[in-house]
Image (cartoon, grey):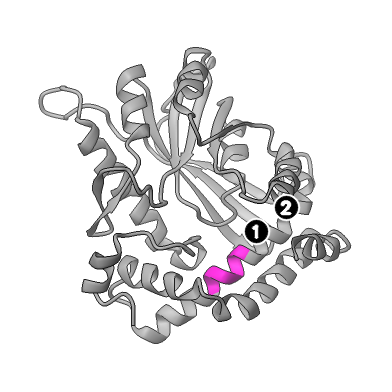
């Protein structure tokens, strides 16, 4: 299916490919077994939304996923900074957390928003060489297809299995580290996320404390078909304001989750949430599964 999509997408412009992928997944996604998880996740993330609004957001989620898949074949064009009308807008909010060049390594955290593949590329445009954790596909052929396309992003990719030692080496070498941390990690401790405790990786907080790095949230937002904005937000402080003491790993993790939940709520229809995010019983108690 992916080969067929890429064959069609490669024959048209990036914008047309994006629209093609969006329409295809909006037609297919709501009929898959994953759709119930998309609806349930959105009900937790956006409890104020009515059911018809949740259904509409879920269709947007599938459309954004389809568009992102189709855009893989056009990553070279999308990331071309010398184009007359670049496809990606770069924005920095607040002061430069890394100071002047050479950049001080940072821990960059993001959610799977917009075309999340562009987060690592965007970070490098701000002057941060970066190594990014990724989850290899279970199907080796599929993983190889995607890895070949990701080369256009220019970053180093670190498989999530046994990644800690490699990431520590990256930071020692002066390279930043990027993680998408909005996904469920079954063996991780609970931390509040959008008002409900969820198993959450503590790796960003642990690395930030050990290497005294800033934690910088990154937001990739879809503005249209094959059009994006990548924003670097102000760093999350590692220290308590009053005392100057380092924050605990638990507090830093909770603050990361709070920031990312806020970014997701800005554009919930762009959030990749096709797997259950919170503990099953907690979600059922909230009425997320209907």
| Magenta-drawn segment | 60-65
Q: Nearer the viewer, residue 272 or 235?
A: 272
Please report contact status of discs 1 and 2: CB closer than 8 Å, yes or no.
yes
Where residue 262 appears, as percent x and y from the top left, is 34, 55
Per the image, the residue denoted by label 1 is 68
Per the image, the residue denoted by label 2 is 72
In the picture, which quadrant includes the C terminus? bottom left
Where residue 85 appears, as percent x and y from the top left, is 75, 50
Q: Nearer the viewer, residue 217 or 158?
A: 158
Which SS does the magenta portion mostly show?
A: helix
For the point 24% across and 32% down, the residue is 249
The residue carrying pointer 2 sits among few (fewer than 14), some (14 to 19) or many (20 or more) residues within 10 Å by Cα, namely many
Where residue 14 appears, as percent x and y from the top left, is 77, 59
Residue 219 lies, with reference to residue 14, above or below; the image says above
Give the total number of marks visible in the rendering: 2
- Location of residue 40 by image quarter: bottom left
In the picture, which quadrant includes the N terminus? bottom right
């Amino acid at each position: 299916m992916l080969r067929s999509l890429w064959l069609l997408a490669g024959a048209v412009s990036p914008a047309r490919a994006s629209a093609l992928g969006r329409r295809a997944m909006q037609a297919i996604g709501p009929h898959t077994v994953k759709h119930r998880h998309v609806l349930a996740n959105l009900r937790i993330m956006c409890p104020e939304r009515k059911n018809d609004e949740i259904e509409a957001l879920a269709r947007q989620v599938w459309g954004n996923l389809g568009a992102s898949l189709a855009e893989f074949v056009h990553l070279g064009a999308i990331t071309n900074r010398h184009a007359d009308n670049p496809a990606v807008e770069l924005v920095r909010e607040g002061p430069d957390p890394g100071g002047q060049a050479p950049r001080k390594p940072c821990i960059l955290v993001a959610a799977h928003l917009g075309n999340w593949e562009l987060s690592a590329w965007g970070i490098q445009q701000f002057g941060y060489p970066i190594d990014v954790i990724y989850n290899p596909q279970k199907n080796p052929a599929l993983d190889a297809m995607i890895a070949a396309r990701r080369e256009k992003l220019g970053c180093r990719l670190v498989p999530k299995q046994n990644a800690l030692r490699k990431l520590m080496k990256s930071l020692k070498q002066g390279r930043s580290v990027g993680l998408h941390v909005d996904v469920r990690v079954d063996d991780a401790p609970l931390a509040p996320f959008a008002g409900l405790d969820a198993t959450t990786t503590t790796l960003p907080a642990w690395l930030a404390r050990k290497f005294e790095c800033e934690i910088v949230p990154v937001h990739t937002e879809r503005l249209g078909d094959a059009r994006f904005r990548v924003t670097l937000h102000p760093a999350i402080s590692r220290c308590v304001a009053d005392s100057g003491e380092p924050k605990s790993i638990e507090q830093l993790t909770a603050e990361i989750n709070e920031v990312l939940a806020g970014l997701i709520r800005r554009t919930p229809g762009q959030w990749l949430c096709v797997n259950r995010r919170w503990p099953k019983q907690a979600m059922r108690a909230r009425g997320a599964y209907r």
